[in-house]
Image: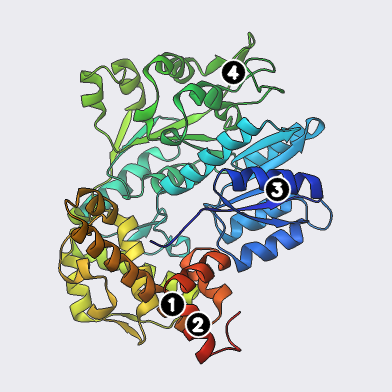
Amino acid sequence: MLPERKQILVVDDEPNLRRVLSAQLERDGWEVHTAEDGAMGLEMLRDNHIDLVITDLRMPKVDGMELLRQARALDAELPVVMITAHGTVDNAVEALKTGAFDYITKPFDQGEVRAIVRKALKTRDLSATDATPQDHANQEGFRYGIIGHSPAIKELYAILDRVADTPTTVLITGASGTGKELVARALHENSSRRDMPFIKVNCAAIPKDLMESELFGYERGAFTGAVTSKPGRFELASGGTLFLDEIGNIPVEMQVKLLRALQESEFERVGGIKTIKVDVRVVAATNSDLKKEIASGGFREDLYYRLNVVPLRLPPLCERGAEDTLLLAQHFIQKFNARLKKNIVDADAEAKKRLTEYPWQGNIRELENVVERAVLFCDTTQLRVGDLPAEVREGRAAPDPTAATEAASSDGLKEQVKAAMSRLERELIVKALEQTKGNVTHAARLLKISRKGLQLKMKELGLRESAETKEPKKLA
């Protein structure tokens, strides 16, 4: 089902490097776009849905740093990986502090590229939804960039008032999609460290054997492929905030070194002997029960207490009440009005009733996805029940199509699931083409797939021919 393969944009003014890197990425199963300079790269970012950017640091017209800044302005969660020569590693480190995901040095090792790409794409998939309009920061119910009036959110505001501008370690707990990263950013941006780096590490996206080098860096020659020294995330965050998301995924053997770094603010790089001192405020988050992990031997008790100085629990959306759900839905309506060029005022009474009665197992992230789809399908100035997906209309949790297929005990049921998914794909594509007046390029961006991928899917579903017959001049 849509969307399809992840899309990577490679930006470099060296044709050979573009060719070699894109060939490797395509062999690994990714869909690759290329641009010969930063200006062309920005144009492609605006016209396509891109999941990852790999860009050279030094280029004519628009260099890698400017591309990084503008790419993050377009999509704050878009991972950008910098390509750099040995002599410009310091510039790459500066790019990391500006918001780049990672960097690769030339000549690059294919295994290193493969690991960084997979980690970046997995991190993007795991990114928490930012459910907050910053321009509402001074309104009641919109404090710290967080939306809500419920008692649980008011309690969160009160804790943030007290701990934001302190060096104290904070442990944020809550189910997936409740906004843990949002709260971590609020702690950083409302502290005296706000002008220093905010470095995020999603521990669930990092292979266990790479965790130590990711956090603490490594020296040249420390292991195969370590062709140059590289600072870890603790060094990059010095003076600012380090956000360790999904902290429960840190391997037990690594937890002693992490505990020492938290207690002493010092560590050594992998393969190094020099002790490095840092000034870092650590915020950790998890959606797992760390006390159960302690009982089973998967998490150290002393590390837990060192992290849990100030505990912050984010409630699931179902505990926050109807008012918070509707406030968030209204925010997402306005957000997708701008993106999809709609003019929807709000939801009608029946649609609001269904939104507040739905269990929202995916929390704020699921609500955002539902509202995006509803705004896309809505043809009036109010969202109606018919614009909502079936599971919300019927008040039941959405089924997992993959799980349903795997669990099917007969070919007949499998075929029914496949047919239902095809109907949904067809419905989404037809609606996107209607919304964009038949422009395939714009429809592909709306659906978050490549233009080529959409064309193939249209051909598979028998839509290409009918679209060409009806509007031959409008299809791009």
Q: Earlier in the sequence, mark 1 or mark 4?
A: 4
Q: CA distance from mark 2 to mark 4?
A: 64 Å
- Which mark lies nearer to you, 3 or 4? 3
Residue 200 lies left or right of residue 98; in this view the side is: left
Q: Nearer the viewer, mark 2 or mark 4?
A: 2
What is the number of the mark on residue 465? 2
**Mark 4 or mark 2, which is nearer the start of the sequence?**
4
Q: Which residue is mark 4?
A: 277
Q: Residue at the far top: name it.
A: 273
Q: CA distance from mark 3 to mark 4?
A: 31 Å
Identity, as a three-letter code, of the amino acid under mark 3? Thr
User: How many residues crowd mark 3 within 10 Å: few (<14), some (14–19), many (20+)?
Assistant: many
**Lower sequence index among marks 1 and 3:** 3
Closer-to-camera residue (137/375): 375
Q: What is the x, y in percent for residue 432?
A: 45, 77
* Residue mark closest to the camera, 1 vs 4: 1
**Looking at the rendered structure, which numbered label has been put on residue 343?**
none
Q: Position of residue 296 (x, y in %)?
A: 22, 19
User: Which residue is at the front of the view, 269 or 161?
Assistant: 269
Amino acid type, mark 4: Lys
Numbered mark located on residue 55 in the image:
3
Circle 1 sits on which residue? 462
3 or 4: tag closer to the N-terminus: 3
Where is residue 379 drawn, in percent x and y? Answer: 36, 86
Gap in angstroms between the C-alphas marked 2 and 3: 37 Å
The amino acid type of the residue labelled 1 equals: Gly
